[in-house]
Amino acid sequence: MIFRLATLQDLPRLKDMYRRIITYLDEVDMQIWDEHYPCELLEGDVEKRQLYIMMQGDAPVAAFALCESSAGENHVEWEDPDASALYLERLGVDTAYMRNGLASRMLQKAMEVTKEQGREYLRLFAAISNPPSLALYRKNGFRQAGGVFDEVIDENWIISEYGFEIRVKEP
């Protein structure tokens, strides 16, 4: 498997991968992504050079974005709120590759990139209604921040999320 930055040419296959994940999440009654998110943000992620993918042959099997900020960053209690950080967004593993350690491998890659970019922390938000993700982050050494971020999707849809962080580099 090859880990690299995504390109615009990867977008059709990446969107297909995310659509399979969304279908799976709907089947297990975890409505945390929809027909708009995350697919509508992928092109911008590529243009900002913040979307990373793991490729198996010519197919993406996992991806994530590393962003400079997050909507919830000021809504939870980080260990050191002034420390430099990147925010992991849109971590997805193709349904055919779930439950084989690839998500943990992608977290390790995200930590490596964060450290290479000179940041102290890798941070993220995970829906309270997604126990597998919560377990994944805890298993990989992430510490849960204090508080909850209620992300308002629309007037009828609010996703409550925990913040998680891991120190990747000493200040």
Image: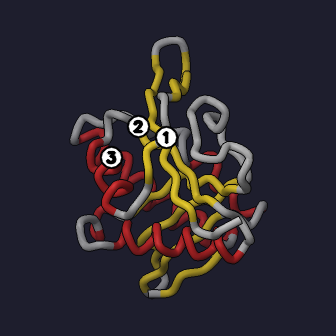
How crowded pointer 1 is (Cα within 10 Å; few <14, some 14-19, many 20+) is rated as some
Q: Residue at x 68, y 72 (%)?
A: 7
Tag 1, which secondary structure?
Answer: loop
Amino acid on which disc 3 is placed: Thr
* Residue 149 position in % (x across, y down): 52, 28
Q: CA distance from mark 3 to mark 2?
A: 17 Å
User: Pointer 2: what residue?
Assistant: 127
Q: Residue at x 53, y 49 (%)?
A: 124
Q: Position of residue 91 (x, y in %)?
A: 48, 57
Q: CA distance from mark 1 to mark 3?
A: 30 Å
* Residue shown at 45% from the left, 27% from the top: 159
Select label 1 or label 3 by which is in front.
1
Name which residue type carries label 1: Ala
Q: Secondary structure at mark 2?
A: strand
Q: Position of residue 13 (x, y in %)?
A: 51, 67
- Circle 3 — which element? helix
Q: How is the image coloured?
A: secondary structure
Task: Name the residue: 52% across, 75% down.
Answer: 109
On residue 23, which mark appears? 3
Label 1 or label 2, whichever lies nearer to me, is: 1
Q: Amino acid under label 2?
A: Ala
Toward the right, the furthest residue is: 48
Regarding residue 86, the answer to whether it shows in the image is yes
| Precedes in sequence: disc 1 or disc 3 | 3
- In front: label 3 or label 2: 2
Q: What residue would you read off at disc 1?
A: 145
Give neighbour class at mark 3: few <14, some 14-19, many 20+ (Cα, 10 Å).
some
Number of numbered tags placed on the structure image: 3
Does 171 sit left or right of 132 as displayed? right
